Image (cartoon, rainbow, N blue to C red):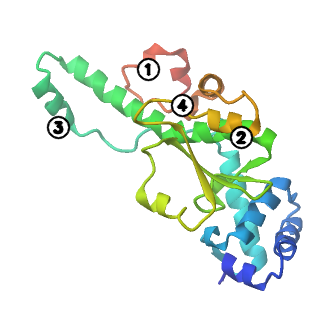
Amino acid sequence: MINFDNIIAVSSSTSDFLQIFKDSFSEINELFSEAHEVILSACYRNPGLSPSMKSTSQIALAQRWLKKYKNSFERRVSQRVSNPPGTVADSIVETIIKARLTGLTITHLEQIKYAHRLSMSAENIQGLLLEEFLAEQLADFGWFCCWGEVLRHVDFCHKDGSLLQIKNRSNSENSSSSRVRINQPIEKWYRVDAQTGNFQWSYFNQKHNTDQFSEESFVEFVRKTLKRNPRALPVEVGNPWQSSSKSSRQS
């Protein structure tokens, strides 16, 4: 089986490495874009971040990489239909809440249960919304989104070779994710400081001498995205909050 390490090992230069992908894409009439070039160049320069993919040949592996990238882009949050929770709520949670807040009625508890599940669904797409927002905004400054984790631990690649990992909150990173940056040239950015609640958009504004990055812009993007595609946030059948929005009929 062929993996990325094998292709990198037999490539004498970045150009040689990229040509394998250009030829493979050409075989299936797929354009080799600037985004592909930037991300794959970063892959060649940072082999430790190569995706853990295998296939029977160089061509098959290159085409599998492209499929992973395309599928993720085409199913980005503005286009996807998300699935509602696939698990049943644990009734003991309602018992615990009722034991503490004894005045709550069955109706209250039912509302709390579904509100919690709806919040969980919102949290599930929160990172996807942030990624797509930044993909749109950062494109003006030479950054390309690594859709589908086609470069491990990296969310965006810049034309100058810079690598960026994004998080929604400063406390949302696990230890394995942070360790990978120790020996890799990956910058980290998070949207909000979990301790202070301060937003970190100034990072991009200062870096690119602009003022287009802001929480207000992100909020507006979220609103427009969910208005155009309400099914990105699933609302379960029977959710008592469903009647609060006309768009829920489309979920």
Q: Earlier in the sequence, mark 1 or mark 2?
A: 2
Q: Position of residue 181 (x, y in %)?
A: 55, 61
Residue picked out by circle 4: 199
Residue picked out by circle 2: 207
Label of residue 242 in the image: 1
Q: Residue at x 42, y 36 (%)?
A: 194
Q: Residue at x 83, y 77 (%)?
A: 13
In which quarter of the view is residue 230 placed?
Answer: top right
Whether residue 181 sits left or right of residue 13 in the image: it is: left
Q: Earlier in the sequence, mark 4 or mark 3?
A: 3
Image height of 123 relative to 251, above or below: below
Q: Position of residue 105 (x, y in %)?
A: 18, 17
Q: Amino acid at mark 1?
A: Gln
Q: Earlier in the sequence, mark 4 or mark 1?
A: 4
**Could you tell me how far apart the alpha carbons at marks 4 and 3 are, in whole angstroms?**
36 Å
Assign a secondary structure to mark 3: helix
Label of residue 6 in the image: none
**Could you tell me how far apart the alpha carbons at marks 4 and 2 are, in whole angstroms?**
15 Å
Q: Nearer the viewer, residue 60 or 21?
A: 21
Badge 1 local density, few (<14 within 10 Å), some, or many (20+)? some
Image height of 4 relative to 22, above or below: below
Q: Amino acid at mark 2?
A: Lys
